[in-house]
């Protein structure tokens, strides 16, 4: 699976932004997807994941209630709606494809990664 993330940019604190990830490949509808982020000088961290059907999601505590992950299997896309953004959300955001259909927050379970898209939240 090849992944292309888009939608990053500069937004003020409290604002909203939607990231999208387009996937190629016939297996998209059978695999779980995830979003991770990496702030400058920090390790990559889990943000959100969604199972193959979209029926199950899981979020990092730091984004729960503010971010929503969704997918459209007909369009081979996964999205991350981000609301109430904070400066600490500033990072490069990566979408990733899981090896399998169940959700996971472990980066090691994801075999394909997009190129990343930068989100900067100003205070």
Image: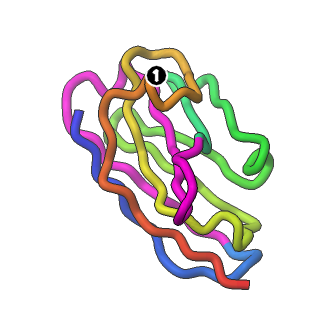
Q: Is residue 43 magenta?
A: yes
Quarter of the C terminus within the rendering? bottom right
- The foreground one among 31 and 91 is 91
Magenta stretch in the rendered image? 16-45
Quarter of the N terminus within the rendering? top left
Q: Is residue 75 left or right of residue 35?
A: left
For image coordinates 36% across by 24% down, the residue present is 29
Q: Is residue 10 left or right of residue 66?
A: left
Q: Is residue 113 above or below residue 109?
A: below
- The foreground one among 95 and 54 is 95
Q: Position of residue 73 (x, y in %)?
A: 38, 33
Q: Is residue 121 above or below residue 102?
A: below
Give the secondary structure at mark 1.
Answer: loop
Q: Is residue 43 left or right of residue 60?
A: left
**Which residue bears the numbered disc 1?**
52
Q: How is the image coloured?
A: rainbow
Q: Position of residue 37 (x, y in %)?
A: 53, 52
For image coordinates 70% across by 73% down, the residue present is 87
Q: Is residue 64 magenta?
A: no
Q: Position of residue 108 (x, y in %)?
A: 44, 25
Q: Quadrant of residue 122?
A: bottom right
The 10 Å Cα crowd at callout 1, few under 14, some 14 to 19, many 20 or more, is many
For image coordinates 64% across by 60% down, the residue present is 82
Q: Is residue 108 above or below residue 24?
A: above
For image coordinates 43% across by 38% down, the residue present is 72
């Amino acid at each position: 699976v090849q992944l292309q993330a888009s939608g990053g940019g500069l937004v003020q604190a409290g604002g909203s932004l939607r990231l999208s990830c387009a996937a190629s490949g016939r297996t998209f509808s059978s695999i779980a997807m995830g979003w991770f982020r990496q702030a400058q000088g920090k390790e990559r961290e889990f943000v959100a994941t969604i199972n193959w059907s979209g029926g199950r999601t899981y979020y990092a505590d730091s984004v729960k209630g503010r971010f929503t992950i969704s997918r459209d299997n007909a369009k081979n896309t996964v999205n991350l709606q981000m609301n109430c953004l904070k400066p600490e959300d500033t990072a490069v955001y990566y979408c990733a494809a899981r090896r399998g259909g169940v959700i996971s927050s472990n980066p090691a379970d994801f075999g394909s990664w997009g190129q990343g898209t930068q989100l900067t939240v100003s205070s």
